[in-house]
Image (cartoon, grey):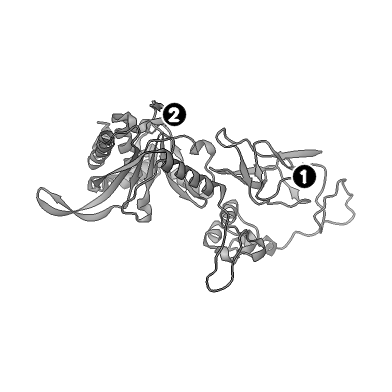
Amino acid sequence: MLIEVKVPQLSESVSEATLGTWHKKEGEAVSRDENLIDIETDKVVLETPAPADGVLVKIIKSDGDTVTSGELIAQIDTEAKAASGDSKPVAEPVPAITPPPAAPAPAAAAGAASPAARKILEEKGMSASDVSGSGRGGRVTKEDAVAAQPAARAAAAAPAVQLSGDRPEERVPMTRLRARIAERLLQSKNENAILTTFNEVNMAPIMAMRKQYGDKFEKAHGVRLGFMGFFVKAAVAALKKFPILNASVDGNDIVYHGYIDIGIAVGSPRGLVVPIIRDADQMSIADIEKKIAEFGAKAKDGKLSMEELTGGTFSISNGGVFGSMLSTPIINPPQSAILGIHATKDRPVVENGQIVIRPINYLAMSYDHRIIDGREAVLGLVTMKEALEDPARLILDV
């Protein structure tokens, strides 16, 4: 019986996707729910599980092809058996006259990779066979994939052209995610009247609170007490006070959202992604920290869903984790504002006429000047600053 393998249902905002590399060849046996191929959209990578046990008898769409929701990409024969020694399936069952061949030695696992490792290698344009695996039986682990260098892949399999000589160059096609990021950034630049306002925050009160309660917090909630929970709560306080910062433009209309969904920019092996903390105004700092930790883990493994990456009314970008001192973040359309936070460093500041050393973080908020006036933007950022410098207000919601 022939079973069709189709592209999984994509979200309404995604019209097409790109096929990755087939994990099986024609004629090879597959097991139900085994991932046959990764499908990359401009937001996430989707796995395509085999709908039944059988043999992959026909691959209709090749690596790199553009596909749409529900499109037929392969066929599985549930009654065929994988042929021995070649890639052609045997359509009819063959009586077993001789014992089946012995299982391959552990070394045959070389070239196999864990799902997380496979995604990272594909992003680099590499295959598992290009990497020496350190896992059991030569299996390529996630750590092996992260450490692998793209230059190690075979020239014949490379999706780029390398020029020889003293000044080599390499041309690599953008991934669908990278191309979508570029498109959205240009859209934001061309369609929004972007202006950025700055302020500085004394992080000493929050650092003291983390030092005093960090261990108890982690024991009680099972997650580390970081800075992001405070920044999200401070942003919520400002968005409540100045709802225009949480609004968006739709044609000639201003849409005021009666909810606060905050996107947190997260780096992943595939590029920048922005998962959404929904109803952040109704969450505690512990709830926020748990959700951020969950997003971070999913981003590393490429497991973020489309639903988790769709929407958002405001965003926060943390360049501080990479050592950034100051930046001007770009608005994530259709949102109208974004907060950029940076590395906290000891700096000289003036307090009561005296120069003192304080742990300072520079805040930058970019906003769409079409609908947000300087007054609301500046006062909104001041609201965040005041909340962060008196964190008890975030706990008491005052």
Coordinates of residue 333 in the picture (x, y in percent): 44, 37
Q: Earlier in the sequence, mark 2 or mark 1?
A: 1
Query: How many labels were placed on the picture?
Result: 2
Q: Is residue 52 left or right of residue 166?
A: right
Coordinates of residue 47 in the picture (x, y in percent): 62, 44
Q: Could you say which disc has been placed on residue 325 in the image?
A: none
Coordinates of residue 12 in the picture (x, y in percent): 57, 32
Q: Quadrant of residue 107?
A: bottom right
Residue 316 in sight here: yes
Q: Amino acid at mark 1?
A: Gly
- Residue that protrudes farthest toward the bottom in the picture: 166
Residue 291 in sight here: no
- Mark 2 and mark 1: Cα distance apart in space: 52 Å
Where does label 1 land, which residue? 54
Q: Quadrant of residue 335?
A: top left
Quadrant of image for the C terminus: top left
Q: Of discs 2 and 1, which sits in the foreground?
A: 2
Where does label 2 land, which residue? 251
Above or below for 331 versus 163:
above
Q: Nearer the viewer, residue 192 or 218?
A: 192
Task: State if disc 1 and disc 2 touch (CB < 8 Å).
Answer: no
Q: Amino acid at mark 2?
A: Gly
Q: Is residue 191 left or right of residue 109?
A: left
Using a 10 Å C-alpha cutoff, classify the residue at mark 2 as few (fewer than 14 neighbours), some (14 to 19) or many (20 or more).
Answer: few
Q: Nearer the viewer, residue 346 or 101?
A: 346
Coordinates of residue 101 in the picture (x, y in percent): 81, 59
Please, what secondary structure does the residue beneath circle 1 have? strand
Quadrant of image for the N terminus: top right
Q: Quadrant of residue 60?
A: top right
